[in-house]
Image (tube, grey):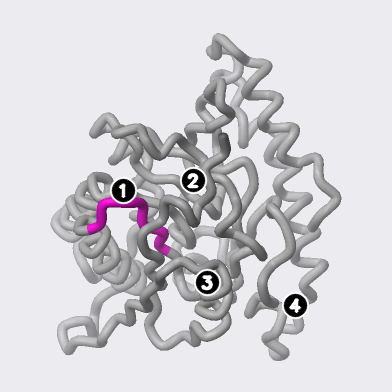
Amino acid sequence: MTIQLRDRIERIFIIAYKESTELLEEAFQKEGIPYEVIRQKHQPDYKNYSSSYLCLLNHKQAWERATRLEKLTLIVEADFVPVIGIGKLPIPFNPDNSDVGIAWLYTCAPQIYSVSEEGFAQGFSTSMVAYLVTSLSAQYLIELADEIKEKIGATNYSTWDSNVDSFLRARKLKNYVPFRNYGEHGGIPNPEHSKNGLSATHRADILYGKLAFMPLYATDRDRGQNYFSVRLQARLKGLARLAMGKYLRLPVLKGSSVPHRLLGFAVRRQLSVKL
């Protein structure tokens, strides 16, 4: 039987700085899942910290709280826009397994490694816009934060979120990507990404359903971005990544004992007329 998110999530943590979270809170209120907004308080020694490290510190606050919870924790950034009825959507892994690391509910540059008989896909994603963790994986992620500070430093830019998968797998945990995205990244472009040679924007390639409210990028009149054109570009990019072997890489497909299962998962998720 499909296990719904709202049946196993103990708490939702919305991490924010000064962003408005009113619409996001209203969306989660309708789902009936307890939530808490964690706002980063500026400290004098934060003055020279990179924005990527400040973001890491905010996630670390949520991880510290997650270690004290028995059930799953959903952590979302303030610019996440969930689909309507997110609480009724399936958990993308077996929550009774003890070796679960992270499950991204919103994916960026995703890849799949394997698909189980139950249809759960292990894989990779970067970006921490919305994801599930257990108390154990949250503890390991705190160790990752400490390692980033030690090896890279608080003042330097880092793509720490791209290291989450390998860090947790090295500790014998399995990471999961969903069949489709449970929401959209609604934020405006991050200038720090562009300065470091990365894509300034990222959007969900395929959604489970209609969004609970309009993303910020579509309501920012100064930028004039049209919601439908942005979503169409995201869908086309997702299809292109599939066709180019970036979502399901050829060596992974050839090395699988059930290649039809991986290929079926990769193709079926795109068979939707929804933007």
Residue hosting label 4? 225
Q: In the rendered image of this protein, does residue 189 appear above or below residue 174?
A: below
Circles 3 and 1, Cβ within 8 Å, touching? The answer is no
The disc at residue 125 is: 2
| Rendered residue at 25%/87% (across/down) | 42
Q: Earlier in the sequence, mark 4 or mark 1?
A: 1
Horizontal and vertical percent for residue 264?
71, 25
| Rendered residue at 37%/64% (across/down) | 11
Q: Which amino acid does label 2 sit on?
A: Ser
Circles 2 and 4, Cβ within 8 Å, touching? The answer is no
Nearer to the camera, 113 or 73: 73
In this view, the mark in front (3 or 2): 3
Residue hosting label 1? 134
Q: In the rendered image of this protein, does residue 234 appear above or below residue 93?
A: below
Q: Which of marks 3 and 2 is nearer the N terminus?
A: 3
| Rendered residue at 62%/24% (across/down) | 262
Q: What stretch is highlighted in magenta?
A: 69-75
At numbered mark 1, what does the secondary structure look like: helix, strand or loop?
loop
Instruction: Report the Cα–Cα distance between label 2 and label 4.
Output: 25 Å
Horizontal and vertical percent for residue 202?
60, 60
Q: Which of marks 1 and 2 is nearer the N terminus?
A: 2
Residue hosting label 3? 28
Circles 4 and 1, Cβ within 8 Å, touching? The answer is no
